[in-house]
């Protein structure tokens, strides 16, 4: 058994928390897990990339090579597209339909591609993908920072490897006391964003 997961987004979207929950879930199945984060200027809205490698055998490197990821979770349009080549074209992507302009966009030195351009490029590279309004739902629930738990809910629906009750428990266990209830609600509603398979 082997699963390589990449989570990509920008600082403040909760990549690290999502990585923690996914890693703990795999360790609870007595699987080997290695992970690494590329954080950069995350606190200033910079790129954050998490690599999670899961296997019942030996894992020699925490980093996922080009074309090797089974799953790419994109918390934001451009960040997903920037790292799409890490995904195996026969893998799966889960994208949050959220646009966060880069520093260069804000300075007028670069243009943010149209959503449809990004989706067309993603579908051309990997036809198996899901696009959800995770941040819009999180905002509706009262806190856009719940985007990560909404994404975890959708993830459970599309990947049978992850157990609904276990991920829900891990989200609750790893959340600060005041965020436990809303995070669990975000997870539950994120699960419902994906139509029944």
Image (spheres, grey):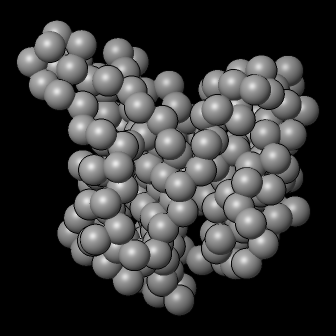
Work out whether 69 lies above or below 152. Answer: below
Picture mark count: 0
Q: Residue furthest left?
A: 109
Q: Residue at x 67, y 53 (%)?
A: 152
Residue 92, above or below 43: below
Quadrant position of residue 100: top left
Residue 64 placement, left or right of 142: left
- Where's residue 145, x and y in %? 63, 26
109 sits to left or right of 24: left
Provide residue 173's location: percent of width, then percent of height.
82, 43
- Quadrant containing the C terminus is bottom right
What residue is rendered at 27% in x and 50% in y?
Answer: 117
Q: Position of residue 146 (x, y in %)?
A: 68, 32
Q: Is residue 120 above or below residue 88?
A: above
Q: Which residue occupies 90% across, 32% down?
A: 181
Mark yes or no: residue 72 visible: yes
Nearer the observer, 113 or 19: 113
**Residue 72 at x, y = what percent?**
43, 61
Residue at 16% from the left image edge and 19% from the top image edge: 104
């Amino acid at each position: 058994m082997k699963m390589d997961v990449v989570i990509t987004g920008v600082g403040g979207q909760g990549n690290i928390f999502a990585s923690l929950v996914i890693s703990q879930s795999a360790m609870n199945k007595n699987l080997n897990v290695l992970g690494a984060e590329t954080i950069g200027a995350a606190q200033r809205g910079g790129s954050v990339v998490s690599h999670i490698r899961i296997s019942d055998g030996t894992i020699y490197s925490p980093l996922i090579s080009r074309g090797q990821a089974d799953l790419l979770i994109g918390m934001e349009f451009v960040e997903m597209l920037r790292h799409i080549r890490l995904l195996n074209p026969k893998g799966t992507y889960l994208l949050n339909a959220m646009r966060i302009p880069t520093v260069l966009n804000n300075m007028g030195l670069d243009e943010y591609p149209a959503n449809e351009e990004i989706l067309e490029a993603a579908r051309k590279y990997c036809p198996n993908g899901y696009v959800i309004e995770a941040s819009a739902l999180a905002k509706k629930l009262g806190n856009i920072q719940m985007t990560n738990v909404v994404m975890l809910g959708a993830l459970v629906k599309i990947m049978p490897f992850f157990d609904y009750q276990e991920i829900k428990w891990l989200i609750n266990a790893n959340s600060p006391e005041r965020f436990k209830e809303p995070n669990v609600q975000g997870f539950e509603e994120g699960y419902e964003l994906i139509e029944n398979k």
